Amino acid sequence: MSLITPLYDSLWNEYLVWSLLVALFTFGWLYHHSFFYRSEDGENPNVDDLEVGVFPVHYDDLKLELAWTIAPFMLIVYLTYISWAPLDNIWSSPNGGSFGDECDYFNNESSDLYFDDDDGLKGAYKANCYHTIEITAKQWVWSFDCGTLEAELCESGFTEADGRAVPHLSLQAGNAYLAYMTSEDVTHAPWFVSLGVKEDVLPGQTTTVWILAEDVEDFLLLCTEYCGDDHAYMMAGVTIHS
Amino acid sequence: MSGDYDHDHHAPQPWGPHDWGHGAPHNSFSPLFMSMGVAIFLFGMAEAWSYGTYNPGNIPMILVGLLVVGLSLFIWWRQDLSFDGHYEPIATGVPFRGIQIRKVGVWVFLMSEMMVFTSLFSTYMRYRLGIENCGTVFDRGMFDPVTNPTGWQEGVTVTCFEPASHLIASSWWHIAPGAINTFALIISSFTVVQALRYAKMPGLDDEVRRKKVYRYLGTTWFLAVLFLTLKMVEWFIGFYVPEISAIGLHEHDIISLVDEGYTINADHYQHHSYVDEATGAHMVADIQVSASLFYVTTGTHGAHVAGGIIGLSYMTYKAWLGGYTPKNAVSIEYFGLYWHFVDLIWVLVFPFFYLY
Amino acid sequence: MAHYKIFGQDPYWMNFYGLMILTLIEVAAVGLDLTEFAESYGTTEKVVTLWILTIIAIPKFIMIAAIFMHLYGDEDSGILTMTALFPAFFIIIMVLFVGLTHPDAASGLPDWCRPGNYGL
Amino acid sequence: MGRNMTISRSMVALLLISIAMVVSPAVNSLPTGVNYDQISAGGCNCHAAAPNAAVMVTLDGLPEEYNMSETYQVTISFTGGPSAEGNANLGGFNLWASGGEITPLDATVQSNGPSEVTHTEAGNDYTSWSIEWIAPSHGRDVDFVVHVNSVNGDGNAGPEDQWNKLTLKVAGSLGPGLEEADPYKVLATLIIISGILLAVTVLYGFYRTNPDAFDWEHLAPWLTEWLTSTDHKKIGTLYFVQGLFFLGIGGILAMMIRIQLAVPGNDFISQDQYNSFFTLHGTTMIFLAAMPLINGFANWMVPLQIGAPDLAMPRLNALSFWLQPFAALLIFTGVFTGEGADTGWTGYAPYIVTEGAHTGVTMWVAGQIMLVASSTLTGINFLTTMAVMRAEGMGWMQMPLFTWSILVANLMLFLSIPAFGVGLIQVYLDRTISTAFYDISAGGDPLLWSHLFWYFGHPEVYVVIVPAFGVISEVLATSARRSIFGYRSMVYAMAGIGVVAFIVYGHHMFTSGMSPSLRFVTMLTTMLVAVPTGIKIFNWLKTMHGGSLVYRTHTLWALGFLVTFTLGGISGMFFPSIAMDTHLHETYFVVAHFHYVLVGGTVFGFFSAIYYWYPKMTGRMLDERLGTLHFLTAFVTYNGIFWPMHRLGVVGMARRHHTYFITTDDFTNLPEWAADWNLFISVSAFLFFFSNFIMVANMLISLVRGEKAPADPWGGWSFEWMTSSPPPTPSFDWHNPPVLKDANEHIAHEPGRLGQWFNRLMVPEDHEEVSH
């Protein structure tokens, strides 16, 4: 069971492990020292002979200091290395990237999105080709344009969520979609919560986001760039059907 | 490290002989009033204009704000007027040891000023490079029987970047105020240095020194005022060119930038060089961003000049009273550093906003 | 204060003359028609003017800073020059990051940023 | 009605609402029917934007004045609108009453809790519905609100449909009840109360200085002294009081936010109020609470630590301070007119320049322009002071670490804040005289603001954390009775953080459409931040090694800081990874992270500073038992607030939302347990808020009854412990300035190659008459 997407989860788990190790090391050390070196009642030795108006004697150890400069550095080099790999997926080029070219509509070419566990460091999404859709934002409504895609692949409409009528986007599992987005007024950002992607929607500019609809699920799409009064209500239902 | 302040200039005594029993040195209402004045001024400005709509009822508030700031400056300077430089604070810490503390302070201040103008120039670069130039847009859309048979049509508005220099560099008369201003600032930089030189010159007769210093500072003041006046002429007023047939001059008016339509609200800007000869149509451009950049950047520089004028007014007065001696001449140096900096900024603003 | 001479003359006056001459050249470069000169080098007048202006702005800058602002020739010139140059790094960063970057779709990521380029 | 009456009523109402909030169950959306919580703000806006008079709503069966606990049969019906015979559906309704109990009579109506009913799916085919209302027993007036929509029957909610609203008051025998408090009034009341408390405290402080001279003749010069003082210690105290005051105001704003978020779909405050509250919470905490607190200690301690009698430019220092309260007035102006700034502390363009943003934004921008001026002046003053006024024998590498941290922080602040200032001026001009910097239709670039803001904003968050590093270095070393481990690497690490701060700001904009190459570069640089921070944490830990740790309240806070700051640092490591940031950006994970570093880092660090330096500043010792109680309660409740937020963010709770959505049959969002955790967070938040009053009380009580403090109560080495507690004015005698000795004198004191090169730049020592 994946928390968000396999791509995110493998990174997340790896980071979590390293976080735990660092935290255990640091807190173990802190715990030990703060009790082991606590001064007993009435005993208060001036270990380094601190004296007012005298810069205290140096207490350092070049080897140790270098050790905890280099060790974290190596750790972050490794963490950078593993976080670099998914860039090809989340920022794939529209043509000829990880997801090939746009699907040929007339030949009913199919996208065939799948997650390849063995690809690269942490696995990667692969697809034959992708479909394009358009997302337009304004205060405080999303609108989805499926273009010429069949209703099976992409359908937009309205639905009800939390007692309000909200826009609805229906996509088919196993397809990669590239959304071209723009805004009519201020900055917004669609967050495909269960897919773990978001990108700002800027007025006067076009940005893109990859929607990698692998699993069947339904979730709320939220706005995650503050856009005014009804920012929280600027949501949409997304259904990924089989 | 002890001793009389009069005999030991290295003694770290920034505030001189001061009776600390009556509080810290320089106790003053000035900071309180100045903050209040600034707040009132900003409040009034925001009430008086809202998205370009002008509510004149709030002008008194702006004036009150300026008045309070003026009052605080008055307090500040009244306290300074008797400052004779007997205890100019000297740095004790390495690596600044031996340098006047306030001089270091001025240089640190100039560091932040550099960042202010870097921000403005970064904005300029971003927009200049990010928005297509109006000339390019016009050339591309011009009538061509093969590639562009429609040409420009009346009533089409495009968004593009129109540098002010397109207007300014189009005529010697337009460039004249800016060019004169360049010379004015350089000359004023020189006069400030001269004032400092005579104020510091040892062995000079007091009366000679007084005259030299206040005349040089006065000249600087005059040049600074000339600078702002010419700026107003260039922006808002324009000027009249008489008929002098001997050098081939014809009687005409030089129109100010604002009258040419180059304003921050110019969303339907037209220029006589942007007319498609084939169709006879104007290119109508939305140039608000480029105009905003021009007026705000040169205006920020102008505001620095205006601040300098206020400071100079006081210093000229003090010089006229004979207030500057070799001991406190450094005040002129501190002002001079600021003034030269304003000149340096003009060295950059002038080519990038007026010529290029 | 200046303890030195330029060509045996007073430094402030010499500096002043120099600045005036450079500024005159600047104004002239804009006013004169350099089209033919530019075309002989296969470029436009605008580019030639810009080059002249930029090249002249640098010595003007240095002359004002060094002589009028006493960053040359005084006891404290060295350390104050260092102070004045301190923001250089931050200025470069701002110009690069704020002034010279442009928004683009994420797909505009150049190849050298792509993990695939390094076999990741 | 007197003000006291209003205040007490508001307070009672606030209390009642809080209790109601806690006991009322979570309101979920229903498959059909409308929910009052949502339509109360915007009406049935899914059926056309505005109410339409064509729809006539009637409510029959209600008496003029009800009898307590009697049952009434009520009929809701409507005519008009697109609803017509033969449509697939005809309409729907929602009825809400402020009292009593409403029950449905048949299957066309369903209950939404005791005080609210709405139609069912079957009820969609009617134009009239019947319910039963059992009148309340309290006898107060009851309000009824009914929303009705008339639909065209196409099955879609849209603007073709029409709706209307009817409100009705049914009198009770006892007349009107307690009015619900307007949150703005509550906020204003609380601010005024805090102001009065502050005034009383000030007066009491004056009284305590000399109980025999409690009259105007003595008060006037005393006040004048405080208003005009340029003494670094007095200004430091002013900063300190301002910082604590606004910490309280920011806390009140946070409590309002937490009440709103205690349960899903809450309507304690409306969305526009919520938006301005979180905006002001951020602005207040960063600019009006954290930075003044830091400046308070910097003012107090930096001149003392470097052995200077005062700052380099004392009068400019007073100006830096006085700009702040007036800036605060401007920032809060909007709140008192009901239109507080609602842009978030980041104020992203173009929303900040649109007319849709509240009018208070202009004043908020104006106030921040003044804060920029204040910070610039502070920067000039402190940098100059630390560069030129160090005592004999104190080289750069002998400065106490707190002074070093203030130096690094001011350098960062002072070089970055002009970018923010210029951005603010652009926005101010856009909003007043209508320039077009962020006018999108004229070609303005929304990202320019983000760049200018974060060029400042990222160094700014280090500006508030780095001084806390300094405090912890002092406190831990003194408490462990040791020299700090690796003094030099501590300094280099701080300087490194200062430089790196300027090249990492792009990580706030990973999802912003910014230039992708820059996003990539900042991903690499952001990872680097971990190295100097790691060095510092390990150095602190190593400092304790072989020491003799004396447990005082400030030691506890320092150890607490180590825990929370490390946690905050670890959660920070998740953001530079772009793949994770695309999910985590703008969620509660971010909120948890920066509160862990800003509260767990800065605030804990400065709580430690308060317990550490309070005796020096006032000459009185603080009560250790109250201090320990404060630490225990605050530390536990603090973690109770922010630890769960990590999980909430990961599962999909977005920040800056005035409400959140629990998974329903329709769409997956937050799991059920998210609501419980939010309630837990809100309760913890209140406990944390109130636990800090223990410290305030401790400070006030100790000011009067505390035991007299010696010059060096903790055994520190730096100059501030040399003067008496409290220090005299001037802090050091002119004719007998302190000289720093160095315990490392036996180590060869030849300057290194860099030092020699630096020495060549300096004015020669023996040069008489430097510039004439």
Image (tube, coloured by chain):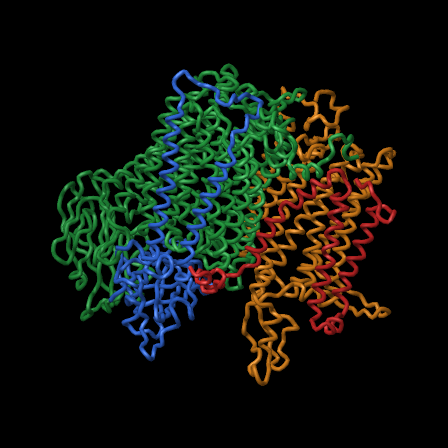
Q: Supply the letter of whichever chain is orange.
A: B
Q: Residue furthest bottom?
A: B145
Colour in which the image shows chain D: green
Residue D258 lies left or right of residue C70; in this view the side is: left
Nearest to the observer: residue D409 or residue D357: D409
Q: On screen, D46 above or below B108?
A: below
Q: Residue B28 placed where, x, y %?
A: 63, 30
Front-most of residues D327 and D622: D622
Q: Which residue occupies the extreme front position in the image?
A: A63
Closer to us: D216 or A11: A11
Q: Is residue D244 left or right of residue B213?
A: left
- Residue at x-position 27% and y-position 37%: D16
Q: Which chain is red?
A: C
Instruction: Tell me the quadrant of the picture where the N terminus of chain D can be found.
Output: top left
Identify the image quadrant of the C terminus of chain D.
top right
Q: Establish if D567 lies above or below B258.
A: above
